[in-house]
């Protein structure tokens, strides 16, 4: 087993990082210049995150990753999460466990920083699942005809906004973030990217942005002029009026727009559309109408089970009252088990090590993450054989205490 060395990278490592980055993520168009600026800034000023290198014993850079810090919403509590991105291995050294070592190091860094949660976008779901992550968030893609959305008759508050409204839009997103389980707060550079890459239509009420659509036009076919779809990357609403006015705005684009391609973590959008069909009929027999497709979005992992309970100590935990011993495989450093006893009483959860448990649950850290973050209920995990329980009569009670009103949603990309 190769013993690799890790260290934070700095400006002196630019040439080696840039060379591997361009082999791992081949740049097209003007991407190479943009990437050069990005990496130089990130190495010198940590403008987005910190780069960490993995070195072979001969001193050569074998791979690297970028580690970010986010404000995160965990079951409605505001906490911090480590984010992982830009994972790359030297192409001549692939398949020798560099990515695996980097992820282990990332988890160590998250523990050192005392983050209860780690988040990433997976290149390979199975690999990260083995590392304890779970597909907590989903992204749905609707392809709606604009006229399928209702026109509520009012859209006088909808305006196009530019970069001078960054502060205002950040406030709007913060409200959304604080109310949305799983959401990561956008950093200043994420807000810059939102403005740099999209047209933004916002609903403003007395100067306050209560919702927005970030979109681009997209040709329906490369050879056709003036035949466009509208690709909506983000649709955020903090009020019903914001939803109504932005919906009306979209509905009234039907003369110009063929389909609204809406990416959203909210699968309830179909409720608003008279006919949410997406134009595809082939997935099932009998001309059944497809309404959206779903992708795994970010994956999460609870980094520290005790710290996770601590982070949400003021949040509600159902109605049932009992003491639970939780044994979570692979949750502690070195992939050891975590063994924790928690008492649920009066709708709250409190660590209660030493107390006599009424019931014992065994799961792995990926299953526990799904349960704790609210992406799967205990009865679902139990049915899928992702968890075991010492007394089946408690399945309902365990399901009740961990239930979250909403499954996690993220729209902050990194
Ligand atoms: C993806 C990448 C980082 C993997 O690095 P690596 O050092 O070769 O990975 P490891 O040897 O640690 O293997 C990690 C896992 O990924 C899997 N994997 C690696 N390369 C793979 C490939 N080409 N196709 C499918 N799975 C692959 C391995 O099987 C392993 O999973 P396992 O433990 O379930 O077997 C590297 O190939 C790379 O830089 N690729 C280009 C950039 C990229 O896609 N980065 C990830 C984006 S987040």
Image: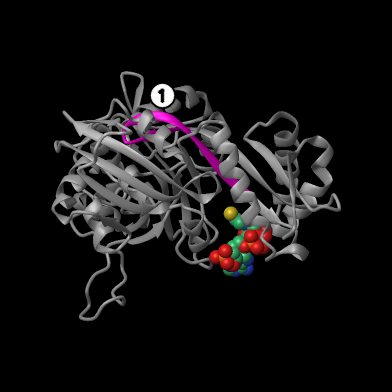
Say whether residue 353 is visible.
yes
Residue that sits furthest to the top in the current view: 206
**Is residue 59 rendered to the left or right of residue 125?**
right
x and y, in percent, of residue 74 in the image:
37, 35
Q: Nearer the viewer, residue 89 or 302?
A: 302
Residue at x-position 31% and y-position 18%: 206
Q: Is residue 75 magenta?
A: yes
Predominant secondary structure, magenta span: strand
Q: What residue would you read off at disc 1?
A: 171
Q: Can residue 25 be seen? A: no
Residue 94 position within the rendered picture, expressed as x and y whole percent measured from the top left: 71, 64
Residue 256 is situated, as x and y percent measured from the top left of the image, at: 37, 54
- Residue at far right of view: 58
Residue at the spot 60% in from the left edge and 44% down from the top edge: 106
Q: Nearer the viewer, residue 162 or 128?
A: 128
The residue lying at 18 percent from left, 31 percent from top is 345
* 132 left or right of 362 in image: right
Say which of 79 and 336 sits in front. Answer: 336
For residue 227, which quarter of the picture? bottom left
Quarter occupied by the N terminus: bottom right
Query: For the residue with label 1, is its CB less than 8 Å from the closest atom of ligand 1?
Result: no
- Please tell me in which quarter of the rendered image ligand 1 is found: bottom right
Q: Quadrant of residue 235?
A: top left
Question: What scheme was used to colour the molecule?
Answer: one colour
**Which residues are the magenta region?**
71-86
Q: Secondary structure at mark 1?
A: helix
Residue at point 36%, 48% (across, down): 327
Vertical comparison of 70 with 377: above or below: above
Report x, y in % for residue 181: 33, 38
- For the image, the number of numbered tags is 1
Above or below, 213 against 64 in this view is: above
| Residue 186 appears left or right of 256 | right
């Amino acid at each position: 087993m190769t013993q690799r060395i890790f260290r934070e990278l700095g400006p002196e490592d630019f040439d080696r990082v840039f060379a591997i980055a361009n082999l791992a993520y081949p740049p097209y168009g003007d991407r190479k210049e943009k990437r050069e600026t990005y990496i130089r800034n990130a190495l010198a000023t940590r403008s987005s995150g910190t780069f960490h290198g993995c070195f072979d014993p001969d001193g050569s850079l074998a791979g690297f990753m970028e580690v970010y810090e986010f404000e995160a919403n965990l079951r409605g509590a505001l906490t911090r999460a480590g984010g992982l991105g830009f994972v790359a291995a030297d192409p001549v050294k692939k398949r020798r466990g560099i990515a695996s070592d980097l992820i282990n190091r990332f988890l160590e860094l998250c523990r050192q920083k005392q983050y209860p949660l780690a988040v990433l976008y997976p290149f390979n779901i199975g690999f990260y699942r083995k590392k304890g992550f779970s597909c907590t968030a989903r992204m749905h893609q609707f392809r709606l005809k604009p006229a399928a959305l209702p026109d509520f008759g009012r859209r006088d508050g909808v305006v196009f906004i530019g970069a001078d409204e960054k502060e205002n839009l950040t406030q709007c997103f913060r409200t959304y973030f604080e109310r949305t389980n799983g959401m990561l707060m956008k950093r200043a550079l994420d807000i810059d990217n939102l403005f740099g890459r999209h047209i933004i239509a916002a609903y403003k009420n007395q100067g306050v942005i209560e919702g927005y659509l970030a979109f681009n036009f997209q040709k329906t076919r490369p050879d056709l002029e003036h035949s466009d779809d509208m690709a909506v990357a983000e649709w955020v609403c903090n009020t019903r009026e914001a939803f109504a006015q932005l919906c009306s705005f979209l509905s009234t684009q039907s003369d110009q727009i063929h389909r609204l391609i809406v990416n959203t973590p909210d699968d309830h959008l179909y409720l608003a559309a008279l006919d949410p069909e997406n134009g595809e009929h082939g997935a099932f027999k009998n001309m059944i109408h497809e309404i959206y497709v779903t992708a795994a979005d970010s994956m999460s992992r609870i980094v520290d089970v005790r710290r996770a309970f601590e982070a949400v100590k003021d949040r509600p935990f159902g109605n049932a009252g009992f003491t639970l011993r939780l044994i979570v495989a692979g949750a502690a450093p070195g992939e050891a088990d975590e063994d924790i006893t928690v008492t649920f009483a009066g709708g709250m959860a409190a660590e209660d090590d030493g107390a006599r448990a009424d019931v014992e649950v065994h799961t792995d850290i990926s299953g526990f993450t799904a349960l704790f973050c609210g992406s799967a209920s205990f009865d679902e995990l139990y049915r899928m054989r992702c968890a075991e329980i010492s007394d089946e009569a408690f399945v309902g009670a365990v399901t009740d205490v961990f239930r979250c009103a909403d499954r996690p949603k993220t729209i902050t990309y990194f």
